[in-house]
Amino acid sequence: MADPFIELSEVTLQYGGGTLALAQTDLRIPQGDFVALVGPSGCGKSTILKLVGGLLKPSSGAVVVAKREVAMAGSGAGAGAVGVTAKVRIGLAFQNPTMLPWLTIRENVMIPLKIVEPFRKDWARKKKGEFAERADALLAQVGLQGFGDKRPWQLSGGMLQRASLCRALVHEPQLLLLDEPFGALDQFTREELWDVLQTLWMKQRPTVLLVTHDLRESAYLANRIAVMSARPGRILEEREVAFARPRTLETSYSPAFATLVQQLRMRIAHARTPAQGDAPEPVGSTPVPVKAAA
Amino acid sequence: MNPLSPQARQRLLSAAALIGFFLMWELICRATSVSDLVLPRPTQIAHVLWTKWPLLWPHTVQTLYTTIAGFALGVGLGIVIGVIIGSSKFAYDVAYPLLVGFSGIPKVAVVPLFVVWFGAGTVPAVLTSMVISIFPVVVNVATGLANTEPELEDVLRVLGAKKLDILWNVSLPRALPYLFASLKIAITLAFVGTVLSETVAANKGIGNVMIIASGNFDVPMVFAGLVILAVMGVMLYAVSAFVEGRLTGWSQRKDASASVVMA
């Protein structure tokens, strides 16, 4: 791992209200890797995602993506003042599909092409037809063939989440950030979408950072699983996941898979109750000598 | 369409209620033989409207024109102020006390001021109508803009979207239903402003006709003025409701044929 695509070094983040979300976190992700972040609720998984995406600035430490510092610690005002997005194309999807209700599904999927260079200037040059074909092709890959002209409210939650994945991938991002993308779906839809995501990843090969509560999901999808401690978050352990791809439902019911999930589960159970000697969780009145981010 | 569809039935009942209202009015007036100085019968009002129409028409046009001018100015200004306030938390916090203070002033109180500044006539009426229709627009546009989901904003910011991109592609379309909701309020308020100013200081307009008629105890004429105002109000309301339906059908989720705002 000589030249990681994403590198967090001793990153600490304290929110404006005083909550210490991350403490001295290190994480390195090589290009094209698929990493899942798991951990107890509120441990700062989403915070890491936002730091990498340049949506937050660390209170101290450095976040580097593609050898460029996303944001310097404590560098002045202006939340979201980031330089990385100009060089690295990023896709982002949340648990909530957040489709724009006044656009069709196809138009929703095309939004990144309207904003991200180099597509943006082609959009101005009326290459919309070409972009529409691209969106349709992607929609077909996730099983939404023929739904491009529908409105978001005509689709089910699972279908919207497929469309949301398409929107996150339509501009062929080098980095895909997923924050519990399947959290609101039922078990069957979720497992179906694991396959969809796996297929898309194997095809486009973006670097993926997936935040999830679902340990089976992390084991099914990721090359590597980073287990985080309770707040303030730190990476406790990184596990390589060696199952051959493409992984299938059978993989997920193999004994090795079950063992891995169980080990992860036990690790998080211990993470919830800090061992003796660990620093206690900070409470509101505890003075924390870290400069606030906001 | 089936003539007895729920929609048709509802329209039929609405019309029946309207006719029934005037019928009851007529019958009660006749039964109690109340003086037309107190409450004229609908047929008397209709008669005045019919015979005095050539006299009333220019005033109607004047009031309509004044109201639309004031409404247009008020909405234009309201959108600008609303966008400024709604797209920045800082501007919102700074301007909010000022806004509340201004909206707290009874608009009747500003009419004499406008008359002092611009003299009696059309200008104070337009201005009153404008001032009165600004606030609902400002408040609704600002609220609509502030309602963008933070997650969606993150999705766009990660793409490198500038503030203007987000405003144009997401926040403004999202605020449209709020804007139209406020237009329906603003158009009726604009009438209030116009008539208010016309009754205080003007020599033209329905408000002026009504104040003169009431001075002459010509109560049927006063009611005729009210009817004209009501009809104009309904018409303008219907126009804004129609435009709203065309532009923000997506927010009502009725059918798949909702039109597209952003191409």
Image: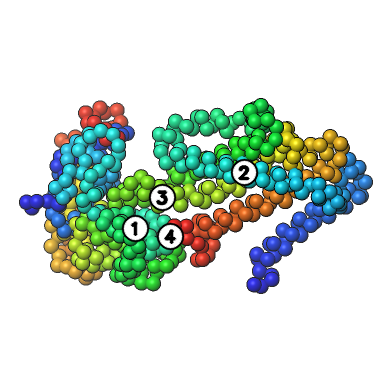
* Left or right of A144 on screen, residue B227: right
Q: Chain of mark 3?
A: B
Q: Residues within 10 Å of mark 3 (few under 14, many from 20)?
A: few
* Residue B245 occupies quadrant: bottom right
Q: Which residue in the structure is indicated by mark 3?
A: B168
CA gap, disc 2 and disc 1: 36 Å
Q: Residues within 10 Å of mark 1 (few under 14, many from 20)?
A: few
Q: Secondary structure at mark 3?
A: helix
CA gap, disc 3 and disc 1: 15 Å
Is disc 3 in the same subunit as disc 1? no
Q: Earlier in the sequence, mark 3 or mark 2?
A: 2
Q: Which residue in the structure is indicated by mark 2?
A: B69
Q: Secondary structure at mark 4?
A: loop
The residue depicted at 81 percent of the width and 47 percent of the height is: B55
Query: Mark 3–mark 2 contact, CB under 8 Å?
Result: no
Q: What amino acid does circle 1 point to?
A: Ala
Q: Which residue in the structure is indicated by mark 1?
A: A124
Q: Position of residue A20 (x, y in %)?
A: 25, 36
Is disc 2 in the same subunit as disc 1? no
Q: Chain of mark 1?
A: A
- Which mark identifies residue A139? none
CA gap, disc 4 and disc 3: 12 Å
CA gap, disc 2 and disc 4: 30 Å
Q: Residues within 10 Å of mark 4 (few under 14, many from 20)?
A: few
Q: Which residue in the structure is indicated by mark 4?
A: B263
Q: Chain of mark 2?
A: B
Q: Secondary structure at mark 1?
A: helix
Is disc 4 in the same subunit as disc 1? no
The residue depicted at 17 percent of the width and 38 percent of the height is: A61
